[in-house]
Amino acid sequence: MYNVHQIPGDCPICGEGMIITKLHCPHCDVTVEGRFTLGRLAMLSPEQLEFVEVFLRCDGKIKRMEEELGVSYPTVRSRLNEIITAMGYEAPHVDNEELTPSQRRQVLDDLAAGNISSEKAVELLRGDLP
C-alpha cells in the first residue's frame, strides 16, 4: 500500500499557499496534471481542523462543544471566528457584549487551565468578542 501524507496548505520554505500540480490513481495508473487548488479547509492548522471536526460532530451546537471541549462559550466562539478568518472569510463581530458572571468565571478558568492566552482572556473579559 502507498504511504499517504497530509497535504501542506502553505509552502514550508516561503509560507505562500501551495497548489496541486499532479494527481495519480494507483488503481488504474492514470495521472492528471494541471493546477488544482487545495480548497479553504487546507488553510487551517491541524488544531483548527480538529476543532472543525468537533463542530461537525456536535451538529454545530456551541453548547455541546462547550461540554465536549470543556471550555466556555466565549472560547468556542473565539476559536470559531479564528477559523472563519483563516479560511478567508470575515468573522462576525459583536461590540462590547457583556459577559454573565458565569461566563467571566469560565474565561478565568480557561486562562488558568492554559486553554487561552492572557491576551485573549483580557479581550474576552473586556467584551471584545470577535
Image: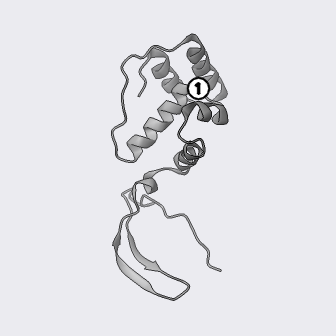
* In the foreground, 47 or 39: 39
Depth check, front residue: 63 or 24: 63
Res. 58 image quadrant: top right
What x and y, as percent, mark residue 62?
A: 55, 33
Give residue 104's quadrant in the image: top right
Task: Determine if residue 11 is in view.
Answer: yes
Compared across the picture, whether 112 is left or right of 46 comes to right
What residue is shown at x 54% (from left), y 29% (from top)? 75
Residue holding disc 1: 72
Name the residue at 60% across, 14% down.
102
Q: Amino acid at mark 1?
A: Ser
Give the residue displayed 66% in from the left and 36% down from the top: 68
Q: What is the image's colouring?
A: one colour
Compared to residue 114, the image places residue 23 above or below, namely below
Whether residue 117 is visible here, answered yes or no, is: no
Disc 1: CA contacts within 10 A as few (<14), some (14-19) or many (>=20): many
x, y percentage for residue 25?
Answer: 50, 82
